[in-house]
Amino acid sequence: MELEIEKILSQMTLEEKASLCSGADFWHTKAIERLGLPAVMVTDGPHGLRKQEGESDHLGLNESVRAVCYPSGAGLASSFDTNLIRQLGEVLGETAAGEGVHTLLGPAVNIKRSPLCGRNFEYLSEDPWLAGEMAAAYVQGVQSRGVGTSVKHFAANNQESNRMSVSAEVSERALREVYLVPFEKTVRQAQPWTVMCAYNRINGTYCCENEWLLDQVLREEWGFDGIVMTDWGAMNDRCRALKAGLELEMPASGGENDKRIVERVKNGLLDEAVLDEAVRRLLRWIARGNDPKAPAPTYDRQAQHEFARQAAGQTAVLLKNEGVLPLKQGASLAFIGGFAKKPRYQGGGSSHINSVKVTNALESCASLARIRYAEGFSVDSDQADGEKLQEAVAAAREAECAVIFAGLPDAYESEGYDRTHLELPACQNELIEAVAAVQPNTVVVLHNGSPITMPWLDKVAAVLEMYLGGEAVGEAEADLLFGAVNPSGRLAETFPLRLEDTPSFLNFPGNGKRVFYGEDVYVGYRWYDARKMEVFFPFGYGLSYTSFAYTDIALDCDRLDAQKKEITVKVKVKNTGARSGREVVQLYVRPQDHTDRPVQELKGFAKVELAPGEEREVLFHLDCRSFELYDERLHKWILPAGKYEIGVGPHSRSLPLRAVIEAEWRGSRLIDDTTTLGEVLDSGRHVAAIDAVAKALGVSDDAGTGEGLGAGTDQMMRELMRGLPLRRLVTFGGMTHEQIQDMIVDLVFG
Ligand code: BGC
C-alpha cells in the first residue's frame, strides 16, 4: 500500500496536492479521477448518523437521512459501561458503512468544565479518565467496521460562547492532567483515523495552527498516525496550519486556501515536502476506508431501535428513591408533563438526528398501569398555566402515584450558546412543588443534557435522570419505572447545589476574547472535594433497586518502586438485595502526602452484573500514570514519593474499602538554585551538609541526621530553613556560590 501511495503522490500535480487538503463540499473530499482517487464522505455525529444528501449545514438545520438516535454523550458516559459503548460504536460503524460514509465525526470528548456549556449533552464527563475510556471503546467499535472516527474538538473547547475565537488561557498542567487526557487515551488505546481540531485558541494560538499541540503532543508524544481535520470553518492561516500538522480543511474556502498553498510553494515560502507529507497522510486515510466499489452492507433499523432502548436503560441514573420505584403494574397513576407525550431526547446542533421512531412514556406504559394524563405545563414556556397546573394537581391527588416528566426545553441547551443558569423553567418547579404537596408518591423523570438544580428534591419520593435518552426513551422509561430494567447508570458529572459553587463560576465564559481557566486542575469533583463542598449528587452517584456490599480489598504489593510498574487491586462485591442488578465499582487514587493535588482521582471502574446473593471478585490494574502528576516546569510526568490511598466503592463520596501503597520517587526533578532545603532534605541527600548549615544558623542541635531541622527546634525556624532556596545559602548558610553549584550538579547527576 505504501508503494501505491508513493506512486499516486509522485503523479500528482502541485495543484492537485493542494486541492486534496480541503473538502469538495460540506461532507466530501475531492476525487482525482485521472488517478483513480475517490472522494470520501464524512458525517456527524456522536450518537447517530446525520448524513445529509440535499442541502448541507453544520448546525443540524437541514434534513438528513433517517437514522436511529441513541442516547447522547452525557447519558452514554453515565453507563460507565465500555462494552455498551463499544457495541454502540459497532452499530454506528455498520450504519455508516451501509450509507457509504468513510469517517464518522465523533466521539465528542471535551471535558465538562462548567455545567453551563451548551454542548455538555454531547460531551462525556467532567472526569478525563472516564471520558477517555469511553471514547476509546467507541472508536474501537466504529473502526472495527472499517469506518473511521474523528475525536473532537481538539482541544480545550469547553464552551460555546465565542467558540470560534476565544483563547483558553490554561496551564500546561491542567491541559495534561485534565483537558488532553480523553484525547490522549483515545489515541493511545484506539488510534482514531482522524482528530478534529477545535475552533478556539489555546494560550493565544489557534488550535488549528498549534504546532505544539498537533505535531509535538499528538503525533510525537502520543504516536497518532491519522490525519487532523478542522472543525467546520475553523481554518485561519492555511499555510501555518499545514506546517503545524493539519492536513484537511473542512469544508473548504472556495479554493482560496488551495491557491495560497500553491503560491507559497512556488514562492519558496512553504516547503513542498510539508505538503507532500500532508498529502501522503491524506492518501493513507482515504485508503483505509471500505472498498467504495463493494456493495454497501445492509443494517436493520428495527434491531437498532431495540439497541437504543437497551442503551437508554443502561444510561439512566436513579438519583432518589424512597421506596416508590419500581411502580406496581396495574396501579392508578397520574402521568404529568408534556415530556410524557413528546420527550426531549436529543440536543440541537450538528448532532441532531432525523430519528426513525420516537417512543414516549405515555404510550409505552399504557398497558402496564391505569394512567391518567395531565399536561401540567407547556414544554416550551417558562410561564405557569394555572388551569393546566390545577388539572395536574387534581390528577395527582386521585392517583396512587404521580410521575412528572420534566426537563429542559430545547431552547435551554444547544450547540452554539451556553446556558446562563442551572434552573428548570419556573413553571416546572412550581408544578413539581404543587403536585408533591398533595401526593407523597411523586416521581420526577428528567429529560436534560446537563445538571439542573432541584429545589424540590426533599419533597418528592423519587428522581430518575434520563438525560437525553435517544429515540427509544419512552420504552426505556417504561422498563425502568416498572422494574423490567434495574437502573445502573452513575453520574459522570457532579450535580452542584448552586451555580455559584461551580469551579469556573468566576471565569466562565470569559470576556469574549479570553477565558481564564483559574480553577486549573480542580475541575468537577476535584474542586468540590478539595473544598469539602456539599453537592446535590456527587460524581459517580446512582441508585439501584437492589443493594451491594463491598469487602476484602487486597493489593498485590504495598510499594511502587523501580521493580514494580503496575499494581493489582482486588475487591469483592456482593448483591445483597432481592433483584439482579448491575453495579459500577469505582476506584480512586488519593495522594496522602502532597498539597496542590486533587484529593482523589478516578483511575478505574468496572460494571458488574450480579444475581441476588451473588458475589464476584473485581480486579483493577493500576500503572504508574495512575499516581503521577504533570510537572510543568520540567514538562514531564513525575511520580512524587509518598503514600497513596486507594479507595474503592459505589461513588466518589462513598469509598468503604481503603488500602495504602507507598511510592518511590520516579521521574526527573527540577533542581536549580531555587530548589529549597526542604526539597533537598526530602530527597535524602546532602543531609550532613544541610545539617551543618542548620547548625551554623543555630537551628539544630541534632547534626548529621537530617532530623535536626525538626527535633528540639522552634517550628518557625524549621519552616524558614526548609523554605530557603539553595541560592540563599550564600547569605544564610555560609556557603560559596561554587559549593552551591557543586551541590546542584551532584543532585542532578549524582
Ligand atoms: C461542530 C462539529 C461538527 C461539524 C460538522 C461543527 O459546528 O462543532 O462537532 O462535527 O460542525 O457538522
Image: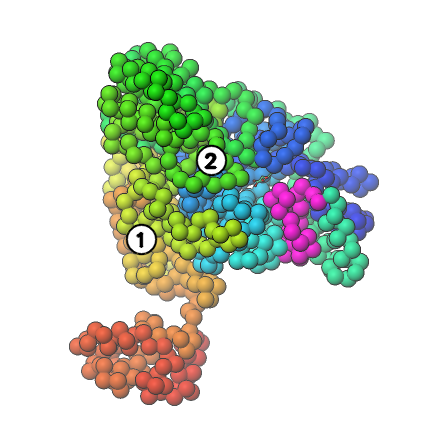
Q: Residues within 10 Å of mark 2 (few under 14, many from 20)?
A: many
Q: Which mark is residue 114?
A: none
- The residue identified by callout 1 is 530
Ligand 1 occupies quarter: top right
Count numbered badges in the picture. 2
At 24% across and 42% down in the image, what residue appears? 551
Q: Amino acid at mark 1?
A: Ala
In the image, residue 386 sits, relative to residue 239, either above or below, namely: above
**Residue 242 highlighted magenta (yes or no):** yes
**Residue 679 highlighted magenta (yes or no):** no
Question: Residue 596 at what x, y percent from top left?
Answer: 35, 60
Q: Amino acid at mark 2?
A: Glu
Residue range highlighted in magenta: 229-253
Q: Residues within 10 Å of mark 1 (few under 14, many from 20)?
A: some
Is residue 459 shown left or right of residue 298? left
SS under mark 2: loop
Q: Is residue 636 visible in this depiction of the protein?
A: yes
At 58% across and 42% down in the image, what residue appears? 150
Task: From the viewer's side, name the closer residue of 196 and 574.
Answer: 196
- The residue identified by callout 2 is 413
Are the residues flagged by discs 2 and 1 in contact, CB closer than 8 Å? Answer: no
